[in-house]
Amino acid sequence: MIGAGRYERNGERTTWRNGHRDRTLDTRLGALQLRIPKLRQGSYFPPFLEARKSSEKALIAVIQEAWIGGVSTRRVDDLVQAMGLSGISKSQVSKLCKEIDERVHAFLDRPLAGEWRYLWLDATYLKQREGGRIVAVAAIIAVAANSDGRREIVGLHIGPSEAETFWSSFLKSLVRRGLRGVKLVISDAHEGLKAAIRRVFGAGWQRCRVHWIAQCPCLCPQNPAEHGGGGAAPGLSAARSRPGERDAAP
C-alpha cells in the first residue's frame, strides 16, 4: 500500500502510516469493527466497502426525494424502517437534506453571463408554516431566453405578496447577478409587477396569452343570450386561430 513494511526504510516508500480510523461494517453475521489505515499523504479506502458506500448514497437519495415530496419526518422514519433499518431522527433527516439547500442556493445565486433578450415572470401562492400557523406566500419565478434561444430558470424567490417592492427587489437581484440585454418582458397584468418592470429594466412588456385567455371569461356575461351576444367562445376561438402569432407563455 505504501511501498514498505512497518518500520522498514527503503527507497520505494511513498508515504507513512498515520494511525487508523474505526469503521463498523454490518454483515449478515453481525457488525464487524474495522480499523482502516490513515496515511500522512493521500488516502486509503478498502475497495470492498465501495458497494456499501453506493448503497448509502441510494438510501440518502430516497430520503431526500421523500423530503422534497413533502413527506413528514414521521413518514420518512416509517419508510426507513420498511427498508430494514432501525429508523431515523428529525435531526438526521435535516442533516441529510442540508445538502439540497446548499445546491439550490448555489443554483439560484449563480452569475448570469451573456445577454438575455426575453424574460418571463410568473407567480403562484403556496402554503407555508410560519410561527406555528399556516400562511399563504407568493412564489415568483423568472425564466429567460438568451440570444441563442436557450431558456433557463434564472431566479426563484418567496415573499409575503406580489407587491411592487417585492417584485422590484427580485428584479434588482437578477440585475446584480448579471442579467442584461432584456428587450421584452412577458407576464400577467399585475400592476405592481408592471411598475417594477418599468422601474428596473425599462424594457417592453407583453401580456402573457395564457393569463389573458384564463381571465377573459371573467369579463364576459354569464348568460350571453340575455345580452344578445355569443359569449366568450367565439372571441377566444378567434384569438387562438390568428395566424402569425406565437404564444408568449413559457
Image (cartoon, rainbow, N blue to C red):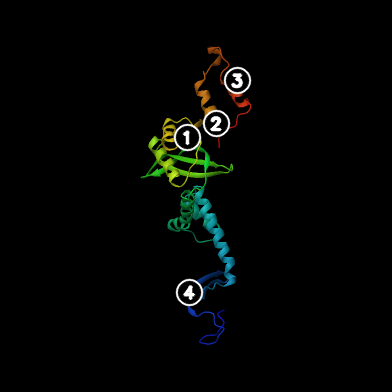
* Amino acid at the residue labelled 1: Ala
Identify the amino acid type marked 2: Val
CA separation in Å, label 4 and label 1: 60 Å
Instruction: Tell me whether the residue at label 2 lies in contact with that at label 3, contact meaning CB atoms closer than 8 angstroms.
Output: no
Q: Nearer the viewer, mark 4 or mark 1?
A: 1
Disc 4, SS: strand
Find the distance from the CA under tag 4 to the CA under tag 2. 60 Å
* First reached walking from the N terminus: tag 3 or tag 1: 1
Q: Residues within 10 Å of mark 3 (few under 14, many from 20)?
A: few
Q: Is residue 233 left or right of residue 110?
A: right
Q: Which residue is mark 3?
A: 234
Q: Earlier in the sequence, mark 3 or mark 4?
A: 4
Mark 4 or mark 2, earlier in chain: 4
Q: SS for tag 3? A: helix
Q: CA distance from mark 3 to mark 4?
A: 76 Å
Instruction: Indicate the position of residue 6 as horizontal and vertical percent values.
Output: 52, 85
Distance, label 3 to label 1, CA atoms, is: 33 Å
Which label number is shown at residue 203? Answer: 1
Residue type at mark 4: give it: Arg
Q: Which residue is mark 2?
A: 210
